[in-house]
């Protein structure tokens, strides 16, 4: 996709409730991460408006043809929705790219098609899971009936606004639920277009709603609403804990939490191709400028391979081109805000004070405008106590720790708090599988790092990285509740 003028991208600053846009008073400035220009303002939905959205969703759930239609019909509408999203790629990719950290090429080639395909993937489940017949005694019939929850409250982060939201929305809708989504206040607009296209595809009004606002006001009101039957959240571990506690306080609501990470990439000296591994390790910490939940932020490398690997990673870092998201040549994304760039810099500076060395990077990069860009950074001479090793940086900062044997590698890989993802690079299959068994992480990648388009593989964290799964059959089933039915067949016998 060609470069474009961000000033010409029109946004609708509103909520989307009951099948139409609902205006609200301007309350928050929304800035473009690439150059810091405030390009729109955002209304904040207060508890009253959140109540209206949830009530509308509840009404649509109870009365529309969504939960009550033949599930194949629901699947057909969702497939149509996916087609409309694909056909709208130019508009959606530009909206995404202007307002977030996603370069236009990635938004057009990955974020938008991946969102559409995720919706298609979940449409295929709509008529595949109805429940079970139980193996009861022969004079009884037992059934376990799958039913949607009702209204699901979905809360999304800013790092991949469309994709992260779609992982919440698609399985919930395919299972017959209604959804009220709150996107991040930093990236609020692209999901409104999704909602508009849902209506065009035939999703009944009120089944998919978007409320805008910050976490403290809008997010909290959504989680606590008595008619929200389940919450599905992606964001930081700190917010996830607050949401879990609000769910407990307001009716022991179930919640799915996809949270932060501090994921290790373990490289043994016998890895098949160290140059290829260097490219993979570099890609795993520089994609979206490290603003990825599963970013491979801790390199744990066998001592003998460390110098060559660090050189190789440094070379990849040097070749990246920081730039505006609307320039097709950009390969290094901006940081979401100046405040976040400052936070990254603070962690790097304190880690250096704690004894770390900067092998490459370690500071801001100047790009035209007021956007915040951070140089891909390698920190060596760190320990498990270093701040950059302990805390999620959410930026392009890779720490390096070396080991001499397998036990030491696995001990270093274990993190006191997080267990989201991990990578192991080795030619020794038994060692890879031993590591897989030992790693306390929701995902283990062997001789690769990162997801493919295999939606069937779920994602989710161990420890403080989360609860439950996005993607896969698991995420679909998590949007259903199961009713046990037991029938006595002796009547009239
Ligand atoms: P965040 O926790 O600050 O915000 C996430 C969302 O929660 C936003 O929409 C925000 O407005 C809302 N929110 C904030 N406080 C709230 C409250 N008290 N009640 C209800 N909602 C509230 O996270 P972020 O900065 O947007 O995203 C980055 C974080 O997300 C990182 O920690 C990253 O690892 C994590 N993340 C995890 C995954 C995963 O799949 N595990 C994927 C992407 C991002």
Image (cartoon, rainbow, N blue to C red):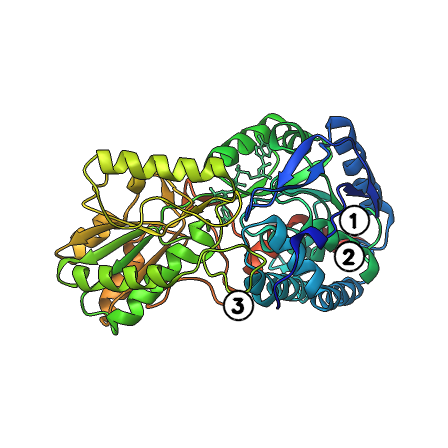
Residue 207: assigned label: 1
Residue 14 position by quadrant: top right
Do the CB atoms of the residues marked 2 and 1 lie less than 8 Å apart?
Answer: yes
Res. 131 visible in picture: no
Query: On the rendered structure, is 315 left or right of 107?
Result: left
What quarter of the picture does the N terminus occupy? Answer: bottom right
Q: Quadrant of the C terminus?
A: bottom right
* Structural distance between the alpha carbons of marks 2 and 3: 23 Å
Q: Disc 2 designates what residue?
A: 198
Residue 416's place in the image compared with 6, above or below, is above
Answer with the quarter of the image where residue 260 lies.
top left
Whole-percent x, y for residue 417 in the image? 35, 39
Instruction: Tell me whether circle 1 and circle 3 mark residues in contact (CB < 8 Å).
Output: no
Q: Earlier in the sequence, mark 1 or mark 3?
A: 1
Q: Position of residue 4 (x, y in %)?
A: 65, 61
Alpha carbon distance from label 2 to label 1: 9 Å
Q: Nearer the viewer, mark 1 or mark 3?
A: 3
Q: Which mark is residue 453?
A: 3
Mark positioned earlier in the residue sequence (2 or 3): 2
């Amino acid at each position: 996709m060609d470069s474009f003028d961000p000033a010409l991208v029109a946004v609708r600053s509103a909520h989307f409730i009951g099948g139409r846009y609902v205006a609200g008073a301007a309350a928050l400035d929304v800035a473009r991460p690439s150059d810091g220009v405030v390009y729109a303002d955002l209304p904040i939905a207060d508890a009253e408006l959140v109540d209206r959205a949830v009530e509308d969703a509840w009404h649509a759930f109870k009365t529309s043809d969504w939960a009550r239609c033949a599930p194949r019909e629901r699947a057909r509408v969702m497939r149509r929705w996916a087609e409309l999203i694909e056909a709208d790629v130019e508009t959606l990719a530009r909206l995404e790219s202007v307002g977030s950290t996603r370069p236009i090429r990635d938004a057009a080639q990955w974020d938008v098609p991946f969102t559409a395909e995720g919706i298609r993937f979940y449409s295929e489940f709509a008529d595949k899971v109805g429940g079970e017949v139980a193996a009861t005694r022969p004079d009884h019939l037992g059934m376990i009936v799958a039913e949607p929850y009702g209204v699901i409250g979905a809360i999304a982060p800013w790092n991949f606004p469309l994709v992260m939201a779609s992982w919440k929305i698609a399985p919930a809708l395919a299972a017959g639920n209604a959804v009220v989504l709150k996107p991040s206040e930093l990236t609020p607009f692209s999901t409104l277009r999704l909602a508009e296209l849902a209506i065009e595809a035939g999703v009944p009004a009120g089944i998919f709603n978007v409320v805008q606002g910050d976490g403290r006001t809008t997010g909290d009101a959504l989680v606590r609403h008595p008619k929200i039957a389940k919450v599905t959240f992606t964001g930081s571990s700190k917010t996830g804990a607050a949401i879990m506690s609000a769910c407990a306080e307001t009716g022991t609501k179930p919640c799915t939490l996809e949270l932060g990470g501090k994921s290790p990439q373990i490289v043994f000296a016998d890895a098949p191709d160290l140059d290829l591994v260097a490219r993979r390790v570099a890609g795993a910490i520089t994609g979206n400028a490290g603003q990825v939940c599963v970013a491979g932020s801790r390199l744990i490398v066998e001592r003998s391979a460390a110098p060559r690997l660090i050189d190789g990673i440094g070379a990849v870092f040097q070749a990246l081109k920081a730039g505006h998201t609307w320039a097709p040549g950009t390969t290094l994304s901006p940081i979401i805000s100046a405040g976040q760039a400052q936070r990254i810099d603070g962690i790097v500076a304190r880690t250096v004070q704690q004894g770390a060395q900067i092998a490459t990077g370690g500071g801001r990069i100047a790009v035209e405008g007021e956007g915040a860009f951070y140089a891909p950074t390698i920190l060596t001479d760190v320990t498990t106590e270093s701040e950059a090793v302990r805390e999620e940086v959410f930026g392009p900062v890779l720490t390096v720790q070396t080991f001499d044997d397998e036990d030491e590698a696995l001990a270093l890989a274990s993190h006191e708090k997080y267990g989201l993802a991990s990578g192991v690079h080795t030619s020794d299959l038994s060692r890879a599988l031993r590591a897989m068994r030992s790693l306390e992480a929701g995902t283990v990648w062997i001789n690769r790092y990162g997801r493919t388009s295999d939606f069937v593989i779920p994602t989710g964290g161990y420890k403080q990285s989360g609860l439950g799964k996005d993607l896969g059959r698991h995420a679909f089933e998590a949007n259903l509740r199961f009713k046990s039915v037991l029938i006595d067949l002796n009547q009239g016998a």
